[in-house]
Amino acid sequence: MARIQILELPEGAGDDRPPFLLIIDEAGEATWNALRPPDGEGLHETLEEQTGARAVLLFEVAVEIPANEISLDPDGYPIRVKLRVEGDFGRFREQVQDEIAKSQAGLANALRTSRRI
């Protein structure tokens, strides 16, 4: 049975989402026939358009991609985990304005207190 792997590529300045390669290996004749476009267009071009991949690579044999391997420590936990955290800036302006208002109120209170002394 065919396997599908994804290899993420480095992002460029104009990329809306991370670019990637779609790799299909262990593809037998049934896989090739199932993926072949009915109108005779190029197989790779059709898959690239449908998936958004930069390129599609098809292999009859198994292909191991080192970037997709996860090294485990002796306890079975991943040694290296890559996380991508994206901030939610929908309320960013509001949060900054609230913090400024709190700071100004604190400063005004401190000035009033210092004048009384």
Image (spheres, rainbow, N blue to C red):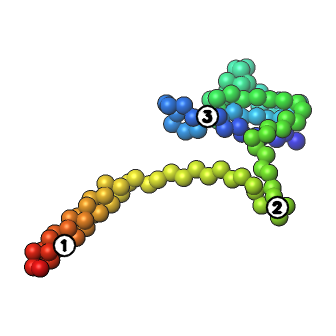
For mark 2, what is the residue? 76
Residue type for callout 2: Gly
Mark 3 and mark 2: span between their CA atoms?
Answer: 29 Å
Return the x and y of residue 18 as percentages of the image width and height: 58, 38
Q: Can residue 30 be seen in this view?
A: no
For mark 1, what is the residue? 110
Q: Residue furthest left?
A: 116
- Left or right: residue 93 versus residue 38 is left
Q: Residue 26 carries which label?
A: none
User: Foreground mark, 2 or 1?
Assistant: 1
For mark 3, what is the residue? 10
Residue type for callout 3: Pro
Return the x and y of residue 104 as percentages of the image width and height: 20, 65
Q: Is residue 107 visible?
A: yes
Q: Is mark 2 on a helix, strand or loop?
A: loop
Is residue 97 placed above or below 33 in the rendered structure? below
Q: Along the polypeptide, which appears first: circle 2 or circle 1?
A: 2
Disc 3 packing (10 Å; few <14; some 14–19; many ≥20): few
Mark 1 and mark 3: span between their CA atoms?
Answer: 50 Å
The residue at 25%/67% (across/down) is 102
Q: Quadrant of residue 20?
A: top right
Residue type for callout 1: Ala
Query: Which image quadrant: the C terminus?
Result: bottom left
